[in-house]
Image: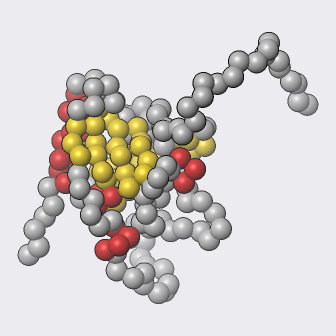
Amino acid sequence: MPDISTKPYLLRAIYEWCTDSGYTPYLAVKVDAATTVPMEYVKKGEIILNISYGATSGLKMDNDAITFRARFNGVSRELYIPVQNVLAIYANENGQGMAFDVSTTAAETAPPPAPVSAPEPASVAPGLSAVPGKTAPSLTEVSHVPDDNDEPPKKGGRPTLTRIK
């Protein structure tokens, strides 16, 4: 019997500690083909996600993956993060948490995709797959997205309201 990884258990424990302490849990994720996140927020192959109760809906942290729905720029998305791709989980307020070594990602160790066949019985939950030419759907609210722009926003004149009929 193969050894069971301690990583998903530690992720759930740090998440619970953050929420019990009133902190905001953040997840640092290495993005690859097995990860479903909004690609427009990915910087240098990584993304930082706010996984607090208020920022997510339907958060599920099991031994293989973390799944939830959230909003990005007002657009609801569904996220799928393999536990193997999690770089760190930490409290945003003080930086305390745990980092993990991600030497191989889920996409690198995943078996080749099986050929598409007839639908399975209804007892099996549907999986997520990418649609060619479209970004993968994902739901999450991110309160902190790293930005390469170091300039402060420019202040313009008086704000205007445009009425559209």
Q: Is residue 105 left or right of residue 144?
A: left
- Would you place residue 57 above or below residue 163 in this image? below
Residue placed at 91% from the left, 31% from the top? 165
x and y, in percent, of residue 136 in the image: 55, 60
Residue placed at 27% from the left, 59% from the top? 102
- Looking at the image, can residue 77 be seen? no
x and y, in percent, of residue 163 in the image: 88, 24
Q: Is residue 23 left or right of residue 164?
A: left
x and y, in percent, of residue 9 in the image: 17, 50
Viewer-nearest residue: 148 or 16: 148
Residue placed at 34% from the left, 80% from the top? 111
Q: Is residue 122 left or right of residue 104?
A: right
- Residue farthest to the front? 150
- Would you place residue 111 above or below residue 15 in this image? below
Residue placed at 23% from the left, 56% from the top? 101
- Looking at the image, can residue 28 be seen? yes
- Residue farthest to the top? 158
Query: What is the count of numbered marks?
Result: 0
Viewer-nearest residue: 89 or 76: 89
